[in-house]
Image: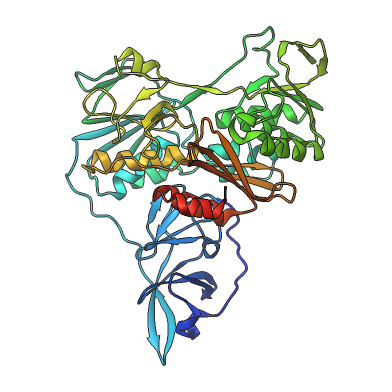
Amino acid sequence: MGDDAQELTGPDLTQGVEPHAVPDGGVLVGHVRGEPVLLARRGAEVFAVGAKCSHYGGPLGEGLLVGDEVRCPWHHAAFSLRTGAVVRAPGLDPIACFDVATRDGKLVVDGKRSALIPALDGRGPSSVVIVGAGAAGSACAEALRRGGYGRSITLIGAEATPPVDRPNLSKDYLAGKAPEEWMTLRDPEFFQRNGIELRLGARVTRLEPGGKRVHLQGGGETEYGALVLATGAQPNRLSIPGADAPHVFTLRTLADSRAIIARAGAARRAVVLGASFIGLEVAASLRARGLEVQVVGPDKVPLARVLGEAVGSLVKTLHEEHGVTFHLGTTPVSIEATSVTLASGVRLDADLVVMGVGVKPDVALAEAAGLTLDRGIAVDELLRASAPGVWAIGDVARWPDARTGERVRVEHWVVAERMGQFAAQAILGGSARCAIVPFFWSVHYDITVNYVGHAESWDRIDVAGSLEARDAAVAYRRGGQTLAVATIGRDRAALQAERAMEQSDEKALRALVPG
């Protein structure tokens, strides 16, 4: 995923560096036999690991050290400095680990260590069945194996493709900047090698919590010791005339993105219904393909409900600078073969229409099985649903937020993966409560908005830096508590805010964004 090439910088670490070149709590990026390597110090210990994140190749030297792990500045993956192991999503594979020695008073990086292979054992339930092969489900399956679970794992996905890099469906892939081979997170052979049974194009029709079985379309059934529901969410479709026309799309799956790309090849004018994150990312991607793009949204400022009016206005300006036309404070009333009609009577020419009007959690199986619902599947601090032996993760789950005590459901890809990893620990007997600090990123042309925390409402917004200069950190606060921080051009500040939220360190958050 991403470009494997990276220009080598810094010293040749096989020749050694002075110890003071790596201060306590600091890093030094160099190279070893043509490979970028990060040196990091924690007290008397010095570590050497690969300097590239295994997700998109992000520069770990620009990241943050937290204890004995390093966190990527781009999408907040974390890796162990001791072993190179993935500590948390969205890291995919371990990073390389190297030996560090002291010779002639210098720190010298030498041989690369072999990757650690987890020893599998008989701990945990008799089997694990995961319904949903998206980010959450696949991350859970992988984490179970990395955690040493040696029994049967079955991953059931309704889509025909293996788990994909879903955020890229509306970003680089849709824009024509990411090749097809980047999109699959893991190929089927990966699951075979790890003893994970992957059933694609398979639909679960009924859950039987009392008998610990799932029933499949076509009459098959599978028993489980533990069941993980990762059924995700389904895109909303407006109930207006023409909403089901062949040139009207929603975007959730790889097949959806492929269909939009195919239609865009012969289209000239696109209308995006909904000024949401996904709607605006689609707009940017279609502009990259040369289409005329108009965006329709009910709010006067796009994204204002999530980011506030100032940041929403900045995002709107970015799109206008790239030729997007907005029709805000209005809604569509019908879609025709070559146009979209708005409530105001305005008619917009359209060869292609994309709806980005939100999603709804897919709770049908859970509801029919009698699980407790709360605008999603209600789970406890260990992500357990109301039936014994059943967990729910990802977009479908509503869990108690450790920071605010409120129950939240968060529709973010990285959060889904981390919930999958956390559920795996709980299934294997872990007792730590889920304390995920939500994180997502949204790309608009050459500007990325990073967002950590979760703020459904706030009573004040404070800004450090300049939104006009596109270099800012924005804090969303309620009752004196910082609920979320959005950054533009300040990747490291986003990492620092995430860490401060993990520690409930309001003083550190105030230092990042005074107010």
64 over 286 or under it: above or below: below
At x 35% / y 15%, what residue is drawn?
Answer: 367
Instruction: State how many labels appear.
Output: 0
Residue at x 57% of width, y 50% of height: 513
Outermost residue toward the top? Answer: 241
Residue 124, image x, y percentages: 19, 40
Measured as percent of width and height from the top left, residue 351 is found at 78, 21
Establish if 72 lies above or below 204: below
Q: Is residue 130 left or right of residue 328?
A: left
Q: Is residue 463 above or below residue 95?
A: above
Question: Which residue shows up at 20% across the image and 18% down it?
Answer: 210
Q: Nearer the viewer, residue 153 or 60?
A: 60
| Residue sitting nearer the eye, 471 or 38 | 471
State the image coordinates of residue 155 (x, y, percent, origin top left).
Answer: 35, 33
Q: Is residue 465 left or right of residue 69?
A: right
Let me know if residue 56 appears in the view.
Answer: no
